[in-house]
Amino acid sequence: MNIAVIDYQGGNVQSLLFALERLGVASATLTADPDQIRAADRVLFPGEGEASSAMRSLRAAGLDKLLPTLTQPFLGICLGMQLLGRHSEEGPADGTDLLRILPFDVVRFRPPDTTHK
């Protein structure tokens, strides 16, 4: 089985590659190459950091256009999962537009209402 681990200069990549190696997965490739990603049997989309800078990196590599077209099994991890949504409140004042692959928005946790009623 050929696994592509998407490389968009996000964090948490080495720990994922190490985990795959420990599991005996010999064919995991860290790549931003569209042809390698399209040819993979499975795709892993790791992430760490914040949405606006991650989306800038994806756009710069052209991956924002590629990822929504993939049909093979695909796993987003941490920020990689969040980026599959429509919009994030993280980043600039108006938030960050995401990949729009899945129908959800990433919202900030709201502090609980502690007033007595």
Image (spheres, helix red, strand yellow):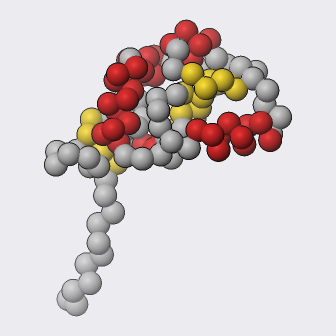
Q: From the viewer's perspective, is 38 left or right of 102?
A: right
Residue 4 appears at what percent x and percent y?
A: 62, 23
Can you give x and y, in whole percent of width and height, for residue 114 in the image? 26, 84
Q: Residue at x 80, y 41 (%)?
A: 22
Residue shown at the point (29%, 66%) measured from the top left: 110
Residue at the location (51% across, 42% down)?
11
Quadrant showing the C terminus: bottom left
How many marks can you see?
0
Q: Observer-nearest residue: 12 or 115?
A: 12
From the image, which quarter does the N terminus lie in?
Answer: top right
Asked if residue 71 lies left or right of residue 61, the reply is right
* Residue 41, x across and y down, in percent: 67, 19
Q: Is residue 113 above or below residue 71?
A: below
Q: At x 71% / y 40%, what residue is drawn?
A: 18
Quarter assignment of residue 12: top right
Residue 77 visible in this rendered orientation of the protein: no
Farthest right residue in view:
24
Q: Residue 42 vs residue 24: left or right? A: left
Q: Residue furthest bottom?
A: 116
Q: In the figure, residue 86 lies in which quadrant?
A: top left
Using residue 115 as the reference point, say whether residue 86 is left or right of it.
right
Is residue 104 placed above or below 6 in the rendered structure? Answer: below
Is residue 70 visible to the viewer in this orientation of the structure?
yes
